[in-house]
Every structure is written in C-alpha cells, then in structure tokens.
Image (cartoon, rainbow, N blue to C red):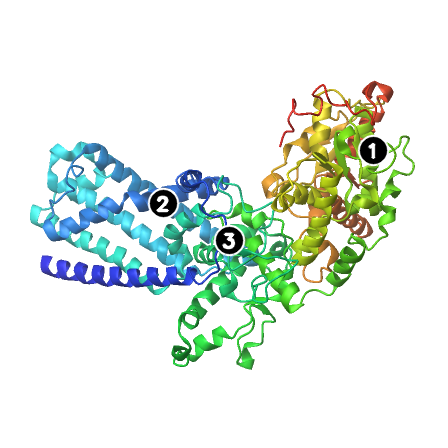
Amino acid sequence: MRTFAIVTTTAITLVAVALVTRTVAGMVGVVRLGQPVVGRTDQPWRRWATMLRETVGHTRLTRWPLVGVAHWFVFVGFGFLFFTLVSAYGQVYGGADWTLPLLGHWWPYEIAAELVASLTLAGILVLIVIRQRNHPRRLGRRSRFSGSTMWQAYYVEATIVVIACCILVLRGLEGALGGPERGSHHLVTAPLVAAFSGLAPTALATAILAVATLKIAVSMAWLVVIALYPTMGVAWHRFTAFPNIWFRRKADGGTALGELPPMYSRGRPIDFEDPSEDDIFGAGAVEEFTWKALLDFTTCTECGRCQSQCPAWNTGKPLSPKGFILDLRDHAYAKAPYLRASENEREALPDQVKAEAQRRLVGAIDDPAAGTLGAVIDSDVLWSCTTCGACVEQCPVDIEHVDHIVEMRRHQVLVESEFPSELNQLFRGLESRGNPWNMNPAARLEWTKGLSFEVPVVGEGDVTDLSRVEYLFWVGCAGAFDDRAKKTTRAVAELLHIAGVSFAVLGPAETCTGDPARRAGNEFVYQMLAQQNVETLREAGATKVVATCAHCFNTIRNEYRQLGLELEVVHHTQLLNRLVREGRLRPVPPTADGERRPVTYHDPCYLGRHNQVYQPPRELLSALPEVEVREMPRSGRTSFCCGAGGARMWMEERIGTRINLERTAEAVATGAERIATACPFCRVMLGDGVTQHQADGKAGEDVEVVDVAQLLLESVRRGGDRSAASASPGDATAGADGGSGDAAPVRD
C-alpha cells in the first residue's frame, strides 16, 4: 500500500509540476506579447500596501457581504492549508505519525488548521449555493454567471470541498491514532476522533495513508487541469490577481476611472502634430494591447460582477464586460503560437491557429455555417458601452474594461474609419464649431438673457483676465446651447451672485472640452480641442474652475493634467453645498402647509463613480426643508447609468430597451415628484425618459426632471434678500473670508 502511494503521488506530482512550469512560462510569454505600458511601477511601497489591502482585506469583494466573507475564508484556506499538503506528503513518505517540524504538535497550529479547514468548507458550500441560486438556467440573461464556463467553476468547487474534507478526516484519524492526550487539540474534529477511536492502530495508519494519498492526488490533479487550461481564470486568478492589482493604473488604490490614459505607441507618447509613420493608433490586433491589458484578460475570474452592473447588458445589448474580456483572452491565447513563431515556423502551425491569426479584432460575427471565423468583438458590442465605469468599479481584480474598449474605439476611428454614422455629425460639429450640437459659438452667451445682473466675460470690460474674480464658471456646451441645461446654468449663476461669489465666463472663447470625442475614440479631435482650451485657460489666468457638467468637470480636472494644466476644479454641487453650510445661501421652507415633496437623486456616472462625488448633492437636497429624499435601489456606487456617456448621447439606441427608460422607470417607482440630477447629459436623458413614460401612461404629468441647483434656487428665492451676501459678483475680495476659499475645502 505504501509503495503504491509513494509511486502514485510521486508520479502525479512530477507531472503536475512539469506541466504547471511549462504553462506559467507560456502565460508569461503571452503577456509579454503586449506593448510596453507607462506608469505601472511608481510608488512601489504604496502598490504593495494597495495589493495587500485588496487581496488580504478583500475590500472589493466585501461590497457583496455574504459572497465576500465566504470567499475570504476560501482565500485564507487556500494559502494556510498548504501546510496540510506538506503534512500529507510527510505521512505518505514518512509514516502515519509524521508531523511538521516545530508546528506539527503545537496546539495553536492544530486548532487553527481545523478552524480554517472548517470555515473554508463552509465558505465554498455557501458559494456553491449562491452559484446555483444564480445559475443561468434559472435566471437566464439576468444571471451574472451567464457566459461563464460553468464546468470549470464546478471542478474548482469540488476540489476545494474534497480537500477540506480530507483535512478534517485526517485530523480525526490523527487524533484517534495519537491517543487521549491529544484530544484537546481537536476542537472541531472531536466527534471524528471519537468515531475513529475504535479502530486498530494499523487500520488508522492505513486510513491516514489512503486519505493523505487522496488529498495529494486531488491537489495535483487540480494543478494538471489548470496547466492544461491556461485560460481557466476561475482557477488562475488565485495567482494572477496579485500582480494584476500591483500593476494597476493608480498606485493609491483608485479605480481605473476618471481620466483616460494618453495614447502611446510602443511605450512612447504619440506626437499628434507630427505622428510617426509606424505609430500604432489604438488596438487593432490583440498584440497591440499593452502587456497589462493581456494580464487583465488572463486574470478575469468570470465572476460576472461587471456584467451584473452593466447598463448595456441589463437592457438587452450584446455587450457583456465579462464576455468582452473573455473573448479577448481566448483570442490572445489562441493566436499566441502564431505570434511567437518565426515566419518559417508559421507554415507548420495547425490550420486553426493560422485561422485565428487572421481574425479581425472588431467587425461582424459571421455565420458559423460559412466556415470562417468572424471578428473577435462584434461592432455592436464595442459601441454599446457608455463608459459609465460600473464594470471597473465592481471588478475584484482591477480589470480596466473601459480603457480597453476606448483603445479599440481609437483604432476603429483613427485607422479603420469604421464607427456609427451618427458620430460623423458629432465630429464635424466639434471640429468646425467647437461643440457637438454644431451651433454658432457666438450663441454661447444666450443663456445670460433675462438675468437681473450682468455676467462678467473674460476679455470684455474690466475683466481682462481672471485675476479679479474667484472662479471661472465653465458653462459647457450643453449649458450654453441646450434649453433644459440653460436653466441649470442660470440657476448656478444666480446662486453664486446671491452668495457674493465673484465669477466670470469665457463666452465664445470657450469650446468643447473634447470628452465626447475622446470617449468615441477620436483622440485627434480631443487633442485639438483640449490644447485650445488649455491655452485659453492659461492666457486667462485660471486657477479655480466651477463646472455644472460632470463630463466637463472630469475632463478639466483629470485629463488636462496630462497636458500640463493643474487647476482647482469643483463641481457646482460641491461649491453650492459649501456655500449652504457656511450660511451664504439659506434655504427657506415653504410658507404654506410646509408639506415635503418627494425627490429622488440620480448619480451622474462621471461625477460619482469616476470622481467619487456622492455626498455634496445629497447634502444639498437634505438641506432643503421642502424636500423628502427617496433613494433609488441602485444609487451611489451601484447607480445605474442614464445612457449618455461614452458619446452614446449622440448615437441611436436600436438594440434592446433604452437605458434612459429603464433608469426613468426606477426613478418613477420611488414615487418621487421630481428627479434631481447634477449633469446636463443625465437631465436630457431622464427628461426624455419621463416624456416617454408620460406618453405611455407610466408616469404622472407632475413628474419632472431638474438639476439640484434649481431646487436650491427655488428654496433660496423664498428668503428674498435674507439669503444675499454683501459682496457683489464683481468684487475681487469675495470669498476672502474663507467662505469658498481654501479655509473651507470642498467636500468630495
């Protein structure tokens, strides 16, 4: 028996180690096929701290509490119980009574081993139940596991169950063999010790040998299987998650949201004024992604958290962030032999590998009956993304889905010229007139008509630059040209005037920040607009900017830094919230019956997830005595997109349910009379949603969409001149008392 056990465990261990070594080398080779990536090794100690916090602390996974706790026990068990595997080898080679040196009979270790094994078993059983309750055969498309390779998950789960049971049984057998003096070391397995105590010592020794052999065989078989399937993310993420988190975009632990990475070619920034002929623009082939992107693809766990939060997937679109990553992963590994082979070697490769190498990265998914491989990523998948960032926010291993989608869009726009036809009008308007509506720039001050005070314009009158005012009010294209957004612009201007905050606008000198062009993949147009704005802001002497558009706020705050412009940028809800807290704006309750009206707040993606501004708008609403705030089920970090981001505002939504209609239905279901938001894009989309719902009889005529600033203005106006500050809008000293200066920092 022992000879058989030794031969068996030795053979399977050697095979497992050899296969895993070969596979790991191959996986490293695949990742190294990618392009160089910049900025992934700065602040190493901070990166180590972030990695340990996210892995050991499970900071992402515990947002789903039950899943997070169960997975944490499995995670701890996977590492801690390695020592029990060493013990099993000792029992096979050295005898049933073999124990680890020093630790073997140390009671804290023995009790810890039992507790960890028990909790690991409990944790994996919980995860098995959760997987079955959310199985695609029960929930269909609504299952976050839809599209996952289920047999691989079953195999991993079964392996963990068997190993945990082997550990507990071994502990029971060891206790029975060791006699009563070791009984106190068996806190969990005492019943098993009692059950096995009637067996003869030889029978116990044989049983220990058999169970130890089984434990080793199951463990090594697992290594053999994952070595044969390098794309088995549900298993390999146990190893690849650590480097993937360490090499994340932001060393401080922030998600890969906010700004998009600049465009690089072979690790060098692209000079858009004089690009090189051999520059790579975006990703048109899998090897044109960076090595970090290929590591992302390798690390996907197929958990489906991204998919469960994706607005496109939840409204019947073909885009699944998980499926997108898995398709790229499978293609990368299938094409890798071709990429790593020399020209002479490629002819001898299997036809399947050569066919994979010829696949387009983006295009139509051909009919399988035609006998040809279609594109890796369908065009509808690529252009369904709203870049809301829900996938990135949820991913427990820090995969950067949005960056990869935009990188592919860049290639489609700049190289292939293949993109939705509606974007032609967007690009023309941005290039010729500096706004996506293709409106005359001279109309950028139309919103000021009807105001009871004059709005200072930089370069006109006494305002030669911004040195005499506190804030540059960045109006944005929507705030200047869209009739609904103009109401927000006027409300903010009036509130700043009432509070005595001095500000000025650029007027016709302002142009689009470039956000829709960049998210649509047109980096050339973005660079043109951004460079123009950066020069204008520098000439005007801007130091502080307040913006009403979440997209403008994000671009000026985060992306203009890439062009060397550092500004203090605040969103209007942040500034207005500060002014209310300081008493410079005073909401006043209604004079009638004082009844509070229900209001629900929609988080703009580019204000919330991309910039972590969640509380200021809510604090503002809570400060209004006539408002009863009702949260939607999906709010804050899990807020549902309005459907306008990623340049989707200028594209038709022809597949599935319209995203804005689903979000509007959720808002209306709260019973709110008003839907408040803090972004003009959201206001347009939700406003259209309410109009459609009213036409369909799904919402009352009294439901309306407003900006938070409008609600505040209504309340402040009731106070008359009691809310006004003493300083006038043109007073350069306004705010010098700390009211909106550095003495009272904006709360993010």
Question: Alpha carbon of mark 3 to alpha carbon of mark 2: how far?
Answer: 19 Å
Relative height, residue 592 to residue 252 (above, below): above
Closer to the chain start, of discs 3 and 1, is 3
Depth check: 66 or 404 in front?
404
Q: Position of residue 439 (x, y in %)?
A: 84, 53
- If the image is split into quadrants, where does the N terminus sit? bottom left
For disc 1, the marked residue is 463
Residue 147's disc is none
User: Which of the two marks, 3 or 1, is nearer to us in this view?
Assistant: 1
Depth check: 426 or 84 in front?
426
Q: Is residue 322 visible?
A: yes
> What kind of element bears circle 2?
helix
In which quadrant of the rendered view does residue 604 lie?
A: top right
CB under 8 Å between discs 3 and 2:
no
Residue 74's disc is 2
> What kind of element bears circle 1?
loop
Crowding around mark 1 (Cα neighbors within 10 Å: few <14, some 14 to 19, many 20+) is some
Q: Amino acid at mark 3?
A: Gly
Residue 304's disc is 3
> What kind of element bears circle 3?
loop
Q: Position of residue 623 (x, y in %)?
A: 72, 25
Q: How many marks overall?
A: 3
Q: Position of residue 695 (x, y in %)?
A: 82, 52
Crowding around mark 3 (Cα neighbors within 10 Å: few <14, some 14 to 19, many 20+) is many
In which quadrant of the rendered view does residue 393 lie?
A: top right
Q: Amino acid at mark 2?
A: Val
Q: Is residue 700 visible?
A: no
Question: Alpha carbon of mark 2 to alpha carbon of mark 1: how far?
Answer: 64 Å
User: Which of the two marks, 2 or 1, is nearer to us in this view?
Assistant: 1
CB under 8 Å between discs 3 and 1:
no
- If the image is split into quadrants, where does the C terminus sit? top right
